[in-house]
């Protein structure tokens, strides 16, 4: 079904609903354009600097981390619940050692505004260029979450394009 452009946060409630249950997919590519996808659930959205921003926390040992550092771009893709097997796989295997797109049978597709790929099977896409990044500082975390939060870099991605399938809200409910 052909996708259409949406405003940055038009389907945010639906995106958060799915993210809380299964996670969403962060897509990146390496310097040769090879795509990779990983499941993320440490992600927020809102307006900063008057711009629509997605912040995502990526642990520094991820293959996706290397890709983001090289390209300064990512996309976020929201798959409907029938793809839980693929989400689990993409959230456990690493693109450093396997071709995750080939193994998950998902299809990389060109984005409109960034070089990082989209996932054709997703029903909502966010295309982001990184406008700021910083590291989580272990000593600054409260003791109760210190063991969960270190070794992550926080990326602030401005949403420069967003699109969705016409029936996205229904597919994500
Ligand atoms: C539901 C779920 C949510 C996850 N959220 C994050 C996250 O927000 N940040 C992160 O660094 N890793 C997260 N992970 C772990 C990565 O998806 C996982 O380590 C993945 O294999 C990394 O892939 P890569 O090495 O190809 O980048 C999550 C995994 C699952 C299953």
Image (tube, rainbow, N blue to C red):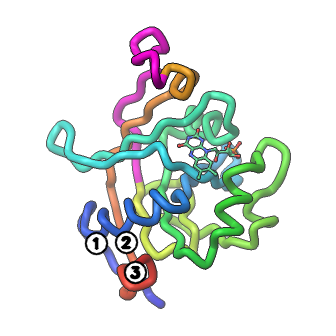
Q: Mark 2 highlights which residue? A: 163
Q: Are marks 3 and 2 in contact (CB under 8 Å)?
A: no
Position of 139 relative to 17 (above/below): above
Q: Estimate how packed mark 3 is, as few (under 14), some (14 to 19) or many (20 or more) residues with alpha carbons within 10 Å.
A: many
Callout 1 crowding tier (Cα within 10 Å): few <14, some 14–19, many ≥20: some
Taking the spot 35% from the left edge, 69% from the top edge, the residue there is 14
Whole-percent x, y for residue 96 in the image? 79, 42
Q: On residue 6, which mark appears? A: 1
- Which sits earlier in the primary sequence, circle 1 or circle 2? 1
The residue range painted magenta reads: 128-145
Q: How crowded is the residue under tag 2: few (<14 C-alpha within 10 Å), some, or many (20+)?
A: many
Q: CA distance from mark 1 to mark 2?
A: 5 Å
Q: Is residue 157 above or below residue 18?
A: above
Residue at screen point 18% across, 37% down: 49
For ligand 1, give the image quadrant. top right
Q: Residue at the top extreme?
A: 139
Query: What residue is disc 3 on?
Result: 168
Residue 125 position (above or below residue 144) = below
Magenta span includes 134? yes
């Amino acid at each position: 079904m052909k996708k259409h452009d949406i405003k940055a946060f038009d389907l945010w409630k639906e995106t958060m609903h799915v993210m809380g249950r299964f996670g969403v997919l962060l897509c990146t590519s390496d310097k040769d354009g090879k795509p990779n996808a990983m499941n993320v659930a440490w992600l927020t959205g809102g307006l900063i600097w008057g711009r629509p921003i997605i912040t995502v926390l990526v642990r520094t040992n991820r293959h996706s981390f290397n890709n983001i550092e090289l390209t300064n771009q990512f996309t976020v893709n929201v798959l409907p619940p029938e793809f839980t097997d693929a989400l689990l796989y993409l959230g456990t295997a690493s693109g450093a050692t396997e071709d995750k797109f080939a193994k998950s049978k998902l299809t990389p597709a060109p984005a409109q505004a960034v070089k990082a790929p989209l996932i054709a099977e997703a029903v909502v896409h966010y295309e982001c260029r990184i406008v700021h990044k910083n590291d989580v500082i272990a000593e600054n975390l409260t003791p109760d979450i210190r063991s969960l939060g270190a070794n992550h870099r926080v990326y602030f991605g401005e949403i420069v394009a967003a699109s969705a399938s016409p029936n996205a809200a229904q597919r994500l409910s």
